[in-house]
Amino acid sequence: QVRLVESGGGEVQSGGSLRLSCVASGSIANIFKLGWYRQTPGNQRELVAEITNDGVTNYKVASVKGRFTISRDNAKNMVFLQMNDLKPEDTAVYYCAKSPTKYGYDYWGQGTQVTVSS
């Protein structure tokens, strides 16, 4: 089982930027999709963005389109989420996740906290 570990969270002011990183314990080259989820207290975890092993991206949350960019580096076994123009509503714990096949995500990392102050 490939494990995922996130880093890069922190506290920034509204309008600021953060880059989240996720490193896998093994090769990600054959993992169908990698994604970033986020969760706030009392709410379900939501898929923010995902990227296939062919590099096709999909942003699932309308409010992040144009501000967030997901990317992956198969050689380094890493996936990233560049977050620009952050807003207080982006405050959440962000999780890296993997979908080995087209059938869905099966593993999430431990998460990294992102806090955006106004």
Image: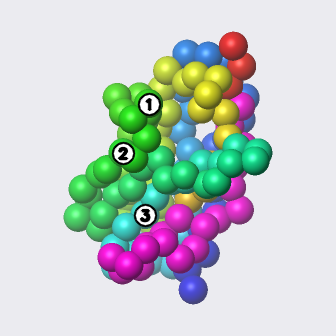
Q: Residue at x 37, y 67 (%)?
A: 33
Q: What amino acid is found at the position of numbered circle 2 in the picture?
A: Tyr
The residues bearing labels 1 and 2 have C-alpha atoms spaced at a distance of: 9 Å
Left or right placement of residue 99 versus residue 43 in this view: left
Using the numbered discs, state the Cα–Cα distance from disc 3 to disc 1 in whole angstroms: 20 Å
* The residue stretch that appears in magenta: 97-115
- Judge the density around disc 3: few (<14), some (14-19), many (≥20) Cα neighbours within 10 Å: many
Residue at the spot 43% in from the left edge and 41% down from the top edge:
61
Query: In this figure, which residue is indicated by the disc labeled 2?
Result: 59
Label for residue 26? none
Q: Quadrant of residue 72?
A: bottom left
Q: Residue furthest bottom?
A: 1
**The magenta stretch spans residue 100:** yes
Q: Nearer the viewer, residue 52 or 105?
A: 105
Q: Is residue 75 visible?
A: no
Q: Position of residue 114 (x, y in %)?
A: 68, 37
Query: First in sequence: mark 3 or mark 1?
Result: 3
Indicate the position of residue 7 as horizontal and vertical percent values.
65, 50
> In terms of depth relative to the viewer, which is nearer, 77 or 18?
18
Q: Is residue 79 above or below residue 18?
A: below
Question: Residue 14: x, y in percent?
Answer: 61, 16
Q: Which residue is mark 1?
A: 63
The residue to which callout 3 is attached is: 34
Q: Secondary structure at mark 2?
A: strand
Q: Are marks 3 and 1 in contact (CB under 8 Å)?
A: no
Please state which amino acid type lies under the numbered disc 3. Answer: Leu
Q: Which of the two residues, 41 or 91, is positioned nearer the viewer here?
A: 41
